[in-house]
Image (tube, rainbow, N blue to C red):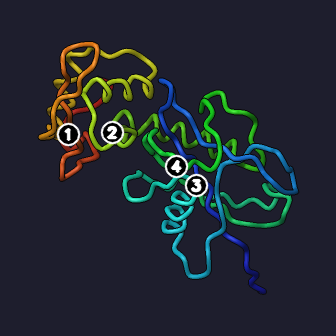
């Protein structure tokens, strides 16, 4: 049996919550084949580079985010028909970033109403949306959509976008504080149209699984 080398690339579903909706970062191809078509950002894994490190490298190149972003592997695609350039292996990841980035390489689109994507990227996006929805129901991964400091109203807003429904304010705050996943900061309260709101941040331990504390979604 003759072994052959097949290129390995990483494809990223980069999610952010912008303008009150879940959005995904997309990129238009600048060269053939399929020049001008919409794709997910990605790149090839370098020689000797672990796939997870490649995903974070590409994420940083496309968004400027690295350490503070949540990145998780989704699925491995290996189909000789998925790319006209030839056989390759695609390791798909999804990433959760805050909306405060300033160096986006690409443009954001509503995740559930994204334009048609080429190659296998439509499947990757669908899997990313499904995984994120599942994570929202049993983890605190949605907190990674927020900046370093945030209010509880902003936390609730994130969960409402991801769950696509309104949540009871008092019940939500009681449960999110019971997780001990967030802690108050020493900074001054944020001033807005209403009375000043307390500021929070991720707790030092950053627990991600709600099941560990016996608190399950939906709220």
Q: Position of residue 185 (x, y in %)?
A: 15, 40
What residue lies at 62% left-to-right and 76% top-to-bottom?
Answer: 46
Between disc 4 and disc 3, the foreground one is 3
Taking depth in this image into account, of 116 and 97 the one nearest to the observer is 97
Label 2 – label 4 distance at C-alpha: 15 Å
Work out whether mark 4 precedes mark 3 in sequence or the reverse, and give the earlier one. 3
Per the model, the C-alpha gap separating discs 4 and 1 is: 23 Å
**Which residue is labeled 4 in the image?**
94
Decide which of tag 3 and tag 1 comes sooner along the chain: 3
Residue position for label 2: 143
Q: Is residue 182 left or right of residue 193?
A: left
Q: Considering only vertical position in the picture, is 15 above or below 157? A: below
Name the residue at 56% across, 82% down: 48
Q: Could you tell me which secondary element the residue under label 2 belongs to?
A: helix
Task: Tell us which disc is closer to us: 3 or 2.
Answer: 3
Residue in the picture at 46% in, 54% down = 65
Marks 2 and 4 close (CB-CB < 8 Å)? no
């Amino acid at each position: 049996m003759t072994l052959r080398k097949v290129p390995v690339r990483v494809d990223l579903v980069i999610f952010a919550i912008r303008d009150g909706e879940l959005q995904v970062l997309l990129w238009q191809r600048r060269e053939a084949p399929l020049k001008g078509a919409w794709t997910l950002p990605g790149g090839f894994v370098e020689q000797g580079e672990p796939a997870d490190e490649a995903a974070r490298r590409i994420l940083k190149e496309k968004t400027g985010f690295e350490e503070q972003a949540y990145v998780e592997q989704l699925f491995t695609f290996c189909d000789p028909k998925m790319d006209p350039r030839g056989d390759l292996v695609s390791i798909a990841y999804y990433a959760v970033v805050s909306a405060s980035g300033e160096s986006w390489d690409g443009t954001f689109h509503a995740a559930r109403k994204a334009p048609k994507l080429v190659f296998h990227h439509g499947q990757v996006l669908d899997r990313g949306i499904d995984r994120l929805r599942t994570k929202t129901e049993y983890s605190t991964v949605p907190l990674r959509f927020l900046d370093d400091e945030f209010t509880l109203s902003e936390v609730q807003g994130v969960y409402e976008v991801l769950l696509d429904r309104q949540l009871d304010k008092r019940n939500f705050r009681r449960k999110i504080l019971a997780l001990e996943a967030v802690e108050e900061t020493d900074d001054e309260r944020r001033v807005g149209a209403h009375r000043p709101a307390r500021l929070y941040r991720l707790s030092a331990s950053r627990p991600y699984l709600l099941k560990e504390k016996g608190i399950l979604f939906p709220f």
